[in-house]
Image: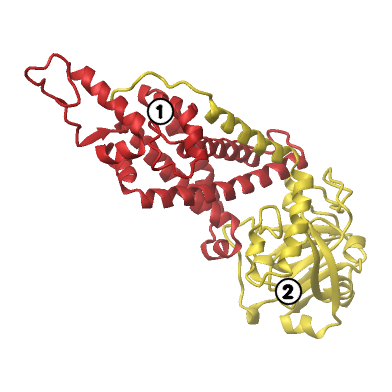
Amino acid sequence: MRTSDPPDGAPIGRRVFLGLVAAGATVVVAGDPLTRALNRLQTTLATHDPTGLSALIPGGGWRYYTVTSGFPSVARADYRLHIGGLVARPLTLTLDDLADRPRTRLIRDFQCVTGWRVPDVHWAGVTLAPLLHEAGVHPSAAAVQFRSFDGVYTESLTLPQALRSDVLVADTFGAGPVPREHGGPVRMLVAPMYGYKSCKWLSEVRLVPRLTGGYWERYGYAQDGWVGHSNGRDDAPT
Amino acid sequence: MPKTDGSATPTDATMPPPEQLVRFTHGERLTHRTTAGIVLLLTATGLVLYVPSLALIVGRRPLVEAIHVAAGLLLPVPALLALLSPEYRHDLAALNRFQPHDWAWLRRHDRREARLPIGKFNPGQKLAAAAFGAAGAVLFGTGIMLLLPTQLHLSNNLREGATLSHDITTFALLALLIGHLWLAYTHPEARRALRSGNMPYRYAAREYPGWTREQIAIRGRKSK
């Protein structure tokens, strides 16, 4: 192909290019306030949106994480929660066993350590403390380890943290069961801490003599993951 | 093209317009095609990573993520290799420059009938090219930030910002791509030019009169 002389005229293409790149960079730098604003917008829209499409607004709403190659699943009838380790009476609980125990409801913001936050999430389930008392915690136990049936994820709390009234074995999310992508049928909810402390697809709660850390702690996340006071963040506490 | 007897210089009368004008070289078409393939792969894997219901259906998140990252790293490669081609560089220069008739084209409602001497690309294409390039650059840059947050010592704020910028740019790019595909669908001659390299003379004369005149003049000089 033959070409002619290069055209003259103002380099508008370059200016548009650089302007848009600068806009993208501005969003990177102003990410924190923008994410908060979009979260608020998304929440407002979601309450008037039967399609669920508002969940796709960038920066708003839930993001789903899994550390394995998919979202694990288990039939509701086959689900078992084991409470063992340094206890007098190890427990194996079905979903019905959990449903029959005294129920606790919690309405809390859910804050991820990566910045997103979902306000006023409705959770229900059984507080962990009475389950631990029921199993009979051995005096030598100092920490609690949580295991996921994804086979990989683990988390841990000190015993005093695990006995807080806002630490929940959650089987209800909103009006229904905890969906698979949210860690159903049963997950932990450690309400005052960042999301990674709340083990999804919970299969085992184990009393241990000392803290064991967990999946993300190996990558440098804080063991005591209090919202607003850890991981170098200053979010409002949940 | 043969020289016409009895004519010292080629004229419009002696040089019948060709059926087809060469619009894109083989290299340019290959650049477009490989970039389109990479963008398709990025869009598909990106949607699976972003849309929860798709993520549930597909699963295999580490594999999907690895494909997305690999495709993302490859994204600039075809365009950068194409810089070796003078025709591609010339087209970039043509996309960059706005001439008075370009502004008139953007302003006027009768732009199709106004017989403006539009060059190889109309200003809509020029703006779209700049936007595509910027989207690619922002997605590449923020993608690297999301890939190596620890190695780059990024603060939480910057990681959050990179995530948001990557998401917003993706949405803008998808809107742009839908428009791009719609225009390709409604302009078969332009679409075919990217497949065969050739554009029908009649179409070129209507849509890109300035470029068409230029091409005819070059052919004239060439056959002199």
Where A63 falls versus B103 (above or below)?
below
- Mark whose residue sits in front, 2 or 1: 1
Quarter of the image with the N terminus of chain A in it: top left
Q: Given the image, on which type of amino acid does mark 1 rest?
A: Asp
Indicate the chain coloured yellow by its letter.
Answer: A
Q: Report the Cα–Cα distance between label 2 and label 1.
A: 64 Å
Classify 10 Å Cα crowding around label 1: few (below 14), some (14-19), many (20 and above).
Answer: some
Q: Residue furthest left?
A: B5
Q: Is residue A187 left or right of residue B74?
A: right
Q: Residue at x 63, y 59 (%)?
A: A56
Residue B111, percent across and down? Answer: 44, 41
Q: Which residue is mark 2?
A: A81
Q: Which residue is mark 1?
A: B91
Q: Nearer the viewer, residue B111 or B126?
A: B111
Residue A222, percent across and down? Answer: 82, 48
Q: Chain of mark 1?
A: B
Secondary structure of residue under mark 2:
strand
Q: Nearer the viewer, residue A159 or B167?
A: B167
Residue A134, percent across and down? Answer: 87, 77
Is residue A87 something that shows in the picture?
no
Secondary structure of residue under mark 1:
helix
Palette colour of chain B: red
Q: Residue at x 66, y 62 (%)?
A: A55
Q: Residue at x 26, y 22 (%)?
A: B217
- Residue B134: quarter of image: top right
Q: Chain of mark 2?
A: A
Is residue B195 something that shows in the picture?
yes
Quarter of the image with the C terminus of chain A in it: bottom right
Where B137 falls versus B191 (above or below)?
above
